[in-house]
Image: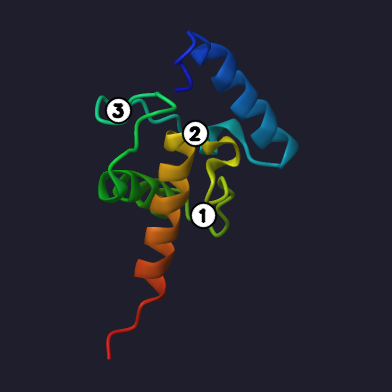
Amino acid sequence: SGNYYNQGEIRKKELEQSCCALGIPASDVTVIDHRDLPDDPAVEWDTQLLATLVLKHIEAKNINLVVTFDAGGVSGHANHISLYTAVRYNLCKLLWVPP
């Protein structure tokens, strides 16, 4: 929820405003606040757990485009890197065709 510095509500509003600027309605925005995914710039999140949660949202909202952080998390933030890794994991899973 972006609450590492007790700015969770500010971060949620920033996310909604950013999405609005991109034409994404607030009803399609989900903030995941999961006990196993703490907001901490030094904590790497579990790829499979995060990938499952993200994919569930993608499928529920019929999303066809995902914008995320780069491989370096933009600023080296471990949570951001984990999100990139989880999205990439889902993409590889979806594109993989068994031999």
Badge 2 density bin: few <14, some 14–19, many ≥20, Cα 10 Å:
some
Disc 2, SS: loop
Q: Where is residue 22 in the image (x, y as percent from the top left)?
A: 71, 42
Q: Earlier in the sequence, mark 1 or mark 3?
A: 3
Alpha-carbon span between mark 1 and mark 2: 25 Å
Foreground disc of the pair 1, 3: 3
The furthest residue to the right: 21
Which residue has dot 3 on it?
A: 34
Q: Nearer the viewer, residue 5 or 8?
A: 5
Which residue has dot 2 on it?
A: 77
Disc 3, SS: loop
Q: In which quarter of the image is residue 95?
A: bottom left
Alpha-carbon span between mark 2 and mark 3: 18 Å
Alpha-carbon span between mark 1 and mark 3: 22 Å
Instruction: Assess whether mark 3 and mark 1 are in contact (beta carbons under 8 angstroms).
Output: no
Q: How many labels does the image show?
A: 3
Q: Which of marks 2 and 3 is nearer the N terminus?
A: 3
Q: Residue at x 35, y 25 (%)?
A: 33
Disc 1, SS: loop
Q: What residue type is labelled 2?
A: His
Q: Which amino acid does label 1 sit on?
A: Ile
Q: Quadrant of residue 96?
A: bottom left
Q: Where is residue 26 in the image (x, y as percent from the top left)?
A: 58, 31
Which residue has dot 1 on it?
A: 63
